[in-house]
Image (cartoon, grey):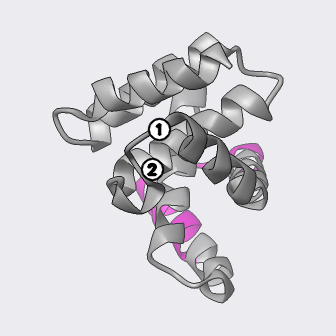
Amino acid sequence: MKRREQRECIFQLLFRVEFNRQEEMSEQEDMYMDDIKEEQAVQEQDETYILKKYRKIVEELPQIDAMLEEVSKGWKISRMGKVELTVLRLAVYEMKFDEDIPEKVAINEAVELARKFGGDDAPAFINGVLAKLAEK
């Protein structure tokens, strides 16, 4: 599985956080991985990477959300679309907590996720918020 495919899986799993209680997420993880395995061959190392990174992002959500609130003036997290919020959370994690991913790559990949999963204005919104964060 390519890194972009892994990132999409992490995004889709992270998206479920907005719609499920914390105690339900373990079951959601299992259901998601079962579903993805039915669609394509998933190596054990891919599954491990996806789940490990997803869990690390969830651990950092309070800090990530605080960073987003700081740079997205006029856009409270509660007002953001769920797709855009999830893309931003993943990108902020990659920019600020994942030393293996260059900041520019994280921004570019976030914009691509927004193109694929978000609305027409999502890529520009994502790019704008992440550009402000990158300046800090």
Q: Are marks 2 and 1 in contact (CB under 8 Å)?
A: no
Label 2 sits on a secondary structure element that is helix
Distance from label 2 to label 1 (Cα)? Answer: 11 Å
- Structural crowding at the residue carrying mark 2, measured as other residues with C-alpha within 10 Å and reported as few (<14), some (14–19) or many (≥20): some
Q: Give the left or right position of residue 117, taking residue 24 as reference.
A: left
Residue 30 appearing in the image: yes
Report x, y in % for residue 23.
Answer: 67, 88
The stretch drawn in magenta includes residue 73: no
Is residue 54 placed above or below 49 in the rendered structure? Answer: below
The extreme front residue here reads: 74
Q: Residue at x 72, y 21 (%)?
A: 101
Report x, y in % for residue 9.
Answer: 52, 49
Label 1 sits on a secondary structure element that is loop
The extreme left residue here reads: 120
Q: Give the left or right position of residue 73, taking residue 29 as reference.
A: left
Q: Earlier in the sequence, mark 2 or mark 1?
A: 1
Which of the 4 image quadrants contains residue 54?
bottom right
**Magenta: main secondary structure:** helix
- Structural crowding at the residue carrying mark 1, measured as other residues with C-alpha within 10 Å and reported as few (<14), some (14–19) or many (≥20): some
> Which residue corresponds to mark 1?
72
Which of the 4 image quadrants contains residue 104?
top right
User: What amino acid type should be assigned to the residue bearing mark 2?
Assistant: Leu
Q: Residue at x 62, y 78 (%)?
A: 25
Q: Residue at x 57, y 85 (%)?
A: 21
- Pick the front one: 72 or 46: 72
**Part of the protein shown in magenta:** 31-46
Q: Looking at the rendering, in which quadrant would you find the C terminus?
A: top right
* Disc on res. 85: 2
User: What amino acid type should be assigned to the residue bearing mark 1?
Assistant: Ser
Residue 6 appearing in the image: no
Is residue 101 placed above or below 113 in the rendered structure? Answer: above
The stretch drawn in magenta includes residue 36: yes
